[in-house]
Image (cartoon, rainbow, N blue to C red):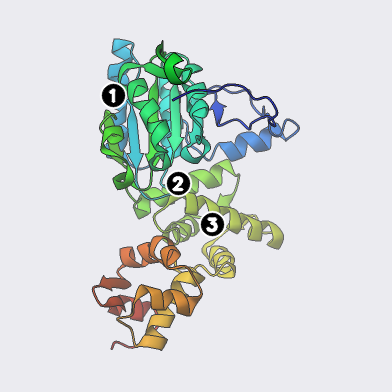
Amino acid sequence: MAIVSSNAGREPAKPASRLVDPNPTPGASEENPGANPELIQREDGLRPKRFADYIGQAELKQVLAIAIEATRSREEALDHVLLYGPPGLGKTTMALVLAEELGVRCRITSAPALERPRDIVGLLVNLQPRELLFIDEIHRLNRVAEEILYPAMEDFRLDLTVGKGTTARTRSLPLAPFTLVGATTRAGSLSSPLRDRFGLIQRLEFYGLDDLQAIVQRAAGILELQLEQEAALEVARRCRGTPRIANRLLRRVRDVASVRGHQQIGRALVDEALSLHRVDGRGLDASDRRLLTLVLEGYGGGPVGLDTLAAGLGEDASTLEAVVEPYLLQLGFLQRTPRGRIVTPAGRAHLGWAAA
């Protein structure tokens, strides 16, 4: 593999990663230097920065805390970490927490941004000792990038081929010891050689109601909202077990409270705000209810094939399978069978349909 570093005739490339300093200057931002420092600090504060602030995932935190303490005592780089699980559960946040706990910087990038060999080579050679490199959606790395990572992860070495043809020669470039933190929603899509090079492989689970309520109350405090306990519980019930969705719904409630002129946010206001966005009491949105209603009204509750549903809803079949169905299956409102999709009695009851 030849590495070409000339950029002659090309437009300046956009950076493949961004650098996160665990101790930033409040309000400093390359993208928006004129922004209100207090606003930036408050919005960024929704992400916890230490284990003490990270709510939920108790087993994961315990495993990582032990690894960090052992790493500090040996004065080494932390083992490479693979975090997997559904989107929105805090994989990126956990990577930033790891960097904060270790007192090092975290370079953040995503696999689709590492299309060319020089993209990942440039990241690796610029890493400082014990720094974290976070690659999101790591299962989407191309084959060349994976092959570059193998010796880098295992031996902290970069193997480069210089020249072409009979003049080609291989050079090994030593790298500073670093920690690769990979995040993926599809752990099964990673190749075995790459997956086996991670020393810590951990899954993030969906959050319980108590943890979600605590997350909502913490976010409300950071956003300076007067949120009643019942209101926080109502947001937690509708966020599909996902902190990212909880924070998003809380912002929509804040918008309605601001427009209506409410200082105190109660359960009724939460219900009004989320009803405007068509999110019901179990967290189902319009797409979820459309699918259930089509199966009930058009096909008597099923079974019905995925392609038939996709055609009836005007959606792509892969979108239904990856985006809409998982939460309905988690709630037990929908079943996948060899003959097709079936709405369960629980799904019928939620939509107010009589049992079949």
Q: Earlier in the sequence, mark 2 or mark 3?
A: 2
Pinpoint residue 229: horizontal percent, then vertical percent.
47, 55
Q: Image point 32% across, 48% down: which residue?
A: 205
Q: Position of residue 279 (x, y in %)?
A: 50, 67
Which residue position is annotated with label 1?
67
Drawn side of residue 233 relative to residue 57, left or right: right
What is the residue that sits farthest to the right in this orientation?
34
The amino acid beneath tag 1 is Ala
On-image quarter of the N terminus:
top left
Mark 2 Cα shell of 10 Å, populated few (<14), some (14-19), many (≥20): many
Amino acid beneath label 2: Ile
For marks 2 and 3, give the CA distance: 12 Å
Which label was assigned to residue 249? 3
Disc 3: CA contacts within 10 A as few (<14), some (14-19) or many (>=20): many
Q: Is residue 160 above or below residue 306?
A: above
Image quarter in which the C terminus is found: bottom left
Q: Disc 1 vs disc 2: which is toward the camera?
A: 1
The correct choice, above or below, for 120 with respect to 334 in the image is above
Mark before the other along the chain sequence, 3 or 1: 1
- The x and y percentages for residue 104 are 46, 19
Query: In this rendering, which labeled residue sits more in front, label 3 or label 1?
Result: 1
Which sits earlier in the primary sequence, circle 1 or circle 2?
1
Image height check: is 275 above or below 298? above
Is disc 2 placed on a helix, strand or loop?
Answer: helix
Residue marked by disc 2: 215
Q: Is residue 292 above or below residue 105?
A: below
> In this figure, what is the number of numbered marks?
3
Q: In the rendered image, is residue 151 in sight?
A: yes
Kind of element beneath mark 1: helix
- Evaluate if marks 1 and 2 touch, with contact meaning CB atoms under 8 Å apart: no
CA–CA distance in space, label 3 to label 1 = 34 Å
x%, y% of residue 326? 36, 62
